[in-house]
Image (tube, rainbow, N blue to C red):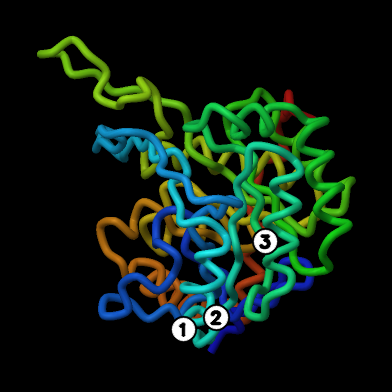
Amino acid sequence: MAELGVRVGPLELKNPVLVASGTFGYGNDCPELSDVNLIGGIVTKSLSMNPRDGNPPDRIVETAGGMLNSIGLANIGVHDFIANKLPELRRFDTAIVANIAASSVDEYCGVLSLLEEQGGIHGYEINVSCPNVKEGGLSFGTNPSMTAEITRRLRSLTKKCLIIKLTPNVAHVSEFARAVADEGADGVSLINTVVGMAIDHRKRTPILSTVTGGLSGPAIKPIALAKVYEAAQAVKIPIMGIGGIMTTEDAVEFLLAGATAVQIGTANFIDPSASMKIARGLGEYCDSNNIPRVTDLVGALKVRTDISLIHSWL
């Protein structure tokens, strides 16, 4: 049997498959449909200091090859999470990564500090890249200096795994990956959703209440692969690949592009056990291809060297 364990900084994962934030509730929402003990980890729904109602409806719409959402980081708030969600999450035999969203640097620090006082949290994913909120979100994630400052402040507050979730809605994601790596981040996760729009041609109106939202699903997989590859050429810290992963083969492609681990998102809405199937599939893939360790796939993409390759992001 192939060895499936991977490391992201101090975080040890039994296998490289996690569920992505915002696509699996807080991690304990559908136990009758999935067994999270079989995957590497859970990335919780985003947590802010206070509860958020999010954006008004309509705030989700299916598209060709994916879906658009404008949820707006709706969540119960960190205090309710600690009191009512975390106790149950502690019972799972998998890594718990708390996703944090905020409208200020101080709020990021405040939420992380509260979680640091609790047992059962193994790491943090910092959302600086949500396209569906007016405060924070992309205003942080498209400014490398601000992204670096957030990383620096949070790094001083924890020795646990610190992952920064980056947006694809920038020219060169490698610039942001370098910025957070220089400030001590243990890893980056990318990509978050791509800004998109849906229109009702009969009514001649936008379908989403916020006009635009975040596109996810198979439609963005080629973009995500390119961004993961770009970041992997720029930094040595681990990368969690996200974006349109629906099958084991999709996950393998992200590992080959340079990701150490992957997060399953939109697929969870179709099949809540998708991540478990992909985790099992990675083991079968390695065994059938005589690959002793899944880490042997990381960055193993065979790029042609007989032609001049110009990477404009380097």
The residue that disc 2 covers is 94
Number of other residues with Cα within 10 Å of mark 2, as a class: few under 14, some 14 to 19, many 20 or more: many
Q: Foreground mark, 1 or 3?
A: 3
Query: In the rendered structure, which amino acid carries the disc numbered 3?
Result: Tyr
- C-alpha span from label 1 to label 2: 6 Å
Describe the element under mark 2 as helix, strand or loop: loop
The percent position of residue 280, horizontal first and vertical second, equals 42, 78
Q: Residue furthest top?
A: 204
Residue at 36 percent of width and 51 percent of height: 266
Badges 1 and 2: C-beta atoms under 8 Å apart?
yes
The type of residue carrying mark 1 is Asn
Are the residues tagged 3 and 2 within 8 Å (C-beta)?
no
At label 2, the amino acid type is Thr
Determine whether, in the image, residue 174 is placed left or right of residue 240. Answer: right
- Disc 1, disc 3: CB below 8 Å? no
Q: Which mark is residue 37?
A: 1
Q: Please say if 49 is above or below 66.
A: below
CA gap between label 3 and label 2 equals: 14 Å
Marks 1 and 2, the one that precedes in the sequence: 1
Q: Residue at x 78, y 72 (%)?
A: 10
Q: Position of residue 172 (x, y in %)?
A: 70, 28
The residue at 78%/59% (across/down) is 186
**Quadrant in which the C terminus is drawn:** top right
Residue at label 3? 124
For this rendering, which residue is in front, 164 or 150?
A: 150
Q: Residue at x 47, y 44 (%)?
A: 73
Q: Is residue 160 visible?
A: yes
Percent across and percent down for residue 232 are: 72, 47
- Disc 1 crowd rating (10 Å Cα; few below 14, some 14-19, many 20+) is some
In this picture, residue 69 sits left or right of residue 109 = left
Tell me the mark number nearer the camera, choosing from 3 and 2.
Answer: 3
